[in-house]
Image (tube, rainbow, N blue to C red):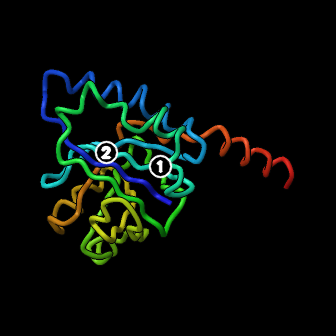
Amino acid sequence: MIYTVECSFDDPASEAQWNEFYSAEKLPALISVAGFRTSQRFKSLSDGCPVYLAIHTVDGLDVLTGEEYRQKGGGNFARWQQHITNWRRNLYDGIEPAPAVQADEVLVMCASGPEALTGIGLAPLSMSAVALDKSPLRRWLASMPRRNAHLVERISTSVQIYTPMTGQLTSERLVRAASDTHVHN
C-alpha cells in the first residue's frame, strides 16, 4: 500500500532546520519500522497544494497503528507542530512499491483522472484511498524527465509537479529479500 503525508510549513526562519530533520532523521527512522518498505520526500513545484509530500510503501494500515511506528516515526513532530499546516495523510491501494523518482525526474500527480497525464504520453499508475483522510479519493501518478516538466504546466491546474528532495530509501529487509531472490534465481 502507499502511505502519503502532505503538508506545508509556515515558519521560514526554521523551515531549513525542519527539512533537515525530516529528510535526515525522520525518513531513516520510518524506514527502520517493520512494514515500511520505501520512503521518499518531495517538494511541490505547483501552486494550490501542500508544499511537501512524503510517499511510503507500507505493508498495511496496521503498520501505522503499531507501537513501533508510534515510537520511531509517528508523532515526533512536537518541536515543529505549530508550524505544520495543510496536513493530510492517506493510505492508498492499487500500486506497490512506490516508484523511485530520480534526481533528474519529477513526480506528476493528478486527482481529476488519468487523461491529463495520458494526453502528454505518460502511463500513470492509479491509486484509490482506503484509509485515513481519504482525500483525494483517487490519484494518478507518473514520473517523467525534469526537462519535460513544462509539458505538464500547460495542461491543467489539477496536476501537481513535485521534485524529489531525497532519493528513495528502502528497508534493509527489502534489499536483503531482493538479493536473496537474485542469488537463488
Nearer-the-camera pick, 28 or 59: 59
- Quarter of the rendering occupied by the C terminus: bottom right
Q: Decide: few, some or many residues near mark 1? Use Cα within 10 Å; few <14, some 14-19, many ≥20.
A: some
Residue occupying image coordinates x 38% and y 67% = 129
- Contact check, label 2 and label 1, Cβ < 8 Å: no
Secondary structure under tag 2 reads strand
| Vertical arrangement, residue 39 with respect to residue 61, above or below | above
Q: Which residue is nearer to you in this view: 32 or 175?
A: 32
Residue with the mark numbered 1: 64
- Vertical relation: 63 (above or below) 95: above
Residue under the point 35% across and 25% down:
21
- Asked whether, in this view, residue 168 is left or right of residue 41, the answer is right
Q: Which residue is mark 2?
A: 163
Say which amino acid is labelled 2: Thr
Q: Please provide percent x and percent y for residue 73.
A: 44, 36
* Whole-percent x, y for residue 37 in the image: 57, 47
Q: Quadrant of residue 179?
A: top right
Q: Tell me, yes or no, if residue 54 can be seen here.
A: yes
Residue 123 appears in view: no
Query: Which residue is nearer to you in this view: 151 or 62?
Result: 62
Q: Nearer the viewer, residue 137 or 164?
A: 137
Image-quadrant location for residue 13: top left
